[in-house]
Image: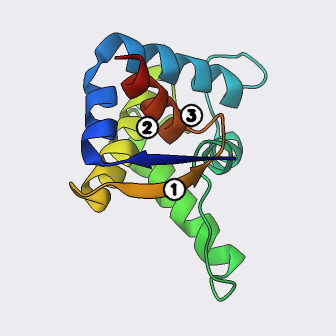
Amino acid sequence: MSVAVLDSKTVTRFVEAKEAFKKCVEKYFKMVDSNGNGVICRRKLRQGLDLLFTVEHESTVSKEDIDNFHSMIFDKFDEDRNGKLDLYEFAALVKEIMMAMARGMGSLPVIVALDQDSLLMMAVQHEIGS
């Protein structure tokens, strides 16, 4: 874990940097697509979201509610309804989540603890490198 300071602009600039964001999404897609078949099933998406976005929730949230949440996300981005997410669908999902986090942060800087491999850390590193 590392501590970083970021705001909504850190995240939006990263998402708008098309090549850097695309490269990052492709890297994470390969991590989540552990068998390399070019698609992500529901189970792999759940595992991948847990890896990419560390989210803490109160113990009052049931496993069933969490499973339903992940299923709802999967259904929203499975555009062709084939029960799998391809790279294009996964990229749309990651972009939507990143932009939602940016909106939630607002314009004031926030101090956060981030995993080295998290997408928010990639946004911070992109900003530092720019």
Identified at 36% across, 10% down, the residue is 19
Q: Name the image quarter holding the C terminus.
A: top left
Identified at 69% across, 16% down, the residue is 37
Q: Quadrant of residue 13?
A: top left
Sort mark 1 into few (<14), some (14-19) or many (20+) by Cα contacts within 10 Å: some
Q: Is residue 11 left or right of residue 106?
A: right
- On screen, 25 above or below 41? above
- On screen, 102 above or below 56? above
Of the image marks 2 and 3, the number of the one nearer the N terminus: 3
Sort mark 2 into few (<14), some (14-19) or many (20+) by Cα contacts within 10 Å: many
Which residue type carries mark 2? Val
Identified at 70% across, 40% down, the residue is 44
Q: Quadrant of residue 56?
A: bottom right
Of the image marks 1 and 3, the number of the one nearer the N terminus: 3
Element type at mark 2: helix
Q: Which residue is mark 2?
A: 94
Q: Position of residue 92 (x, y in %)?
A: 36, 33
Task: Residue 84: give its label.
Answer: 3
Q: Which residue is mark 1?
A: 112
Tell me how far mark 1 sits from mark 3, CA to CA.
32 Å
* Residue mark closest to the camera, 2 vs 3: 2
Identified at 63% across, 82% down, the residue is 58
> Which is more toward the observer, 118 or 96?
118
Which residue type carries mark 3? Lys
* Residue mark closest to the camera, 1 vs 2: 1
Which residue type carries mark 1? Val
